[in-house]
Image: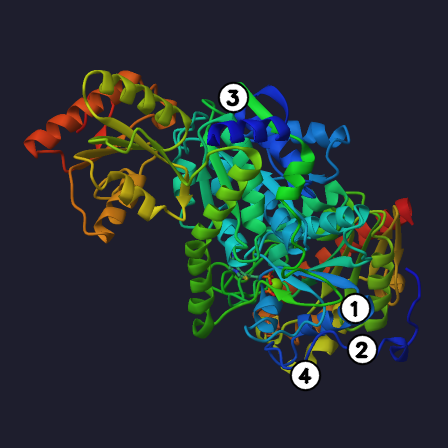
Amino acid sequence: MAIAKALSVREEVVKERLGLTSNYAAAYAVKSVDVDVIAAYPITPQTTIIEKLAEFVANGEIDAEYIPVESEHSALSAVVGAAATGARVFTATSAQGLEFMHEVLYIASGLRLPIVMAVPGRALSAPISIHGDYQDIMSARDSGWIVMIASSAQEVYDSIIMAYRIAEDSRVLLPVMVSYDGFLMSHTTEPVEIYHEDYVRKFTPRNLNRHRLDPRKPITIGVIASPDWYYEIKYQVINALKESKSMIKEVHDEFNKTFGTNYDIVERYMIDDADYVLITYGGASSGNAKEAAIRAREKGLRAGVLRIRLFRPFPTDEVVNAIKDAKAVAVIDRALSPGNTYEGPVFNDVVSALYSRGIDKPIISVIHGISQRTMLVDDFYNLYKTLDEYARTGEYPRKTIFMGLRGGEA
Amino acid sequence: MKMYFRTIKDLPLDEYYGPGQLTCAGCGPSIAVRWLLKAAGSDVIVVNATGCIEVTTTSYPYTAWSVPYLHVAFENSAAAASGVESALKVLRRKGILDTKAKVMVIAGDGGTYDIGLQALSGMLERGHGVLYVLYDNEAYMNTGIQRSGGTPHFAWTTTSPVGSKLRGKVQRKKDIMSIVIGHHIPYAATANIAYPIDLANKVKTALDYLDEGPAFIHVLAPCPPGWRYPEEMTVEIARLATETGYFPLYEWDHGRIRFNPPSNAHFDKSRRKPIIEYLKRQGRFAHLTEEDIKEIEKEIDEYWDYLARLAKAFG
Ligand SMILES: Cc1ncc(C[n+]2csc(CCOP(=O)(O)OP(=O)(O)O)c2C)c(N)n1
Ligand code: SF4
Ligand SMILES: [Mg+2]
């Protein structure tokens, strides 16, 4: 019944089915929301998003000001200025570009500006690598932005539409990053269903009823705060991000209803009865993990995958609920947190989520797919087998496993 | 430059820059901002770079600004202003906002000559209709008087100290006006807080040109603690900067250069006051030898020579 309803909703809202890379899907989403100001600077693997948008603007398909800035620092600064003036804005970057924006990331959230940015994830220099992983995102995770990580081109398209609704909600007013695999998604063509613009526009109404630069009602934005004030103002951002989770869920529910989709802030794949769970984010890791879970189940292992779709604010309850009954868990990180007890950044998040609920269980930190190093389904399948062993013996490594590292770990 | 104001009495009584802000007594940049805002009126959005003016006027929960004001960071005010201007343009076009507001950047020499030069160049090259005002107090004052690309030759600062081997700033002041003019924007001008009518007219003229593209005004604004002189001398010292030919007043208007009084008479060196009159009042030049002063004089002569050639070609 639910499926039939979703199908008929889909029939109504979907305008066309196109073959799009995730980058093009991002551009199509931006086109559909009546964006006002786009400012961006090219970097692999983000470039094709902003090329597509430039094309849309040049052809009059988007009525927006496109600011071809001279750097990423200026890209984010320009959209900060535009958002503070009341415009709906977009920017996109990867890796070095996100690092170059770093200073302004904190300013964007501190000023509570609804900015949407797409970030196909990429490895950070040095050595320079144009290939995909999530080091850039992880290095920006404490900047007070809402961060979503998508796993398909369709999800990129849908998430960016949701991002506008979330960012501009007067109860939220925070910038949102939508990330996904550099190359493996940014440059891979998949079928994407594009919606009729009316539906998208209705879903993303403008919110001009927010603080903005207006000579008729002059306000001062971007003040200096003494130690007497800084702490409380910063706490408001912390709190807004925390509180945003329920609004984000609300937007997901409404999006699902409007567009006949089935998104949640985490994706549970064969989780309900799973003994062994791989926690992943992004496209390639999650896809491989799902394949491996199917194979593991064929071999009699109760395997499941938990994909983290909303990364900030972290979906603590959803993660804990999904794995609390599992016998053993592995968190696959495509990013590094050098010098930490465990080098997998999301592993550390998962462990603190478990700790906060008083749960202790075999859980391992696995690094894989750094700079797009090939990840095989076999690798993930073998992880399920190892988890089985760990659960049986109760013995498991208390340090991060660097999967596929040539020469082994030191 | 159009003459909107002829005497000080023509300037509006309205104040958009509130009292009680925290600049030092005799702050030149503060005087500059007051005149700027008077000339610009209420329909303006200010984008301010990190620096003395920003930290002294926006101490939460107070503000000195009664026009809309945005501060983002130190090096990006031109980029943020590009965004504000683009937003106004498109929201106007879409019928979402009904506004004629103009955009004005106010940034220091550090935020302009040095760390913000890239963003400024980008904004000028892209042709945003923004008036960029550089208030030049010739050093990073907010962080405690460090040298910038705008600090003059030989001047003492905390990072160009007077030591036994090096005596003050080793390099000459960067010619920011030539850099800006190289972008072929409609209007660029120098101004000085000691000449408020000239300054106000230049602001109005610049704002009128913004439909065509960017405008730039370089305002000299002395700083008592940074230049080491008594605070009641600010305007006098500023005036001497122009009277000695150190800081000439001129405009670059659609490819033509025009010199404003009193600088229009200063191609004739005998009409300029001796540079020593300017230098001797400032502690930052207290260590200068006769030779150093000669060197400065030579540099000013060279600069006038360069300006004369510009005037000949583009006058
Ligand atoms: C990226 C960055 N680097 C350094 C600083 C520290 N800083 C703040 S204001 C300032 C100097 C400002 O100098 P200027 O632009 O000349 O303005 P003034 O203080 O003289 O008014 C510096 C170095 C900063 N805020 N941001
Ligand atoms: S240090 Fe100089 S520029 Fe800064 S507030 Fe004081 S007088 Fe003004
Ligand atoms: Mg300065």
Q: Quadrant of residue A86?
A: bottom right
How far apart, in angstroms, are the residues tagged by discs 2 and 3? Answer: 57 Å
Mark 2 or mark 4, whichever is nearer to me: 2
Q: Quadrant of the C terminus of chain A?
A: top left
Identify the secondary structure beneath mark 3: loop
Question: Whole-percent x and y of residue A299?
Answer: 19, 16
Horizontal and vertical percent position of residue A140: 43, 45
User: Mark 2, mark 3: which one is toward the viewer?
Assistant: 3
Ligand 2 positioned in quadrant: bottom right
Q: Chain of mark 4?
A: B
Q: Amino acid at mark 3?
A: His
Horizontal arrangement in the rendering, residue B21 relative to residue A305 (left or right):
right
Note whether residue B262 is visible.
yes
Same-chain status of marks 1 and 3:
no
Chain designation of label 3: A
Pointer 3 residue Cβ closer than 8 Å to ligand 1: no
Q: Which numbered disc covers residue B14?
A: 2
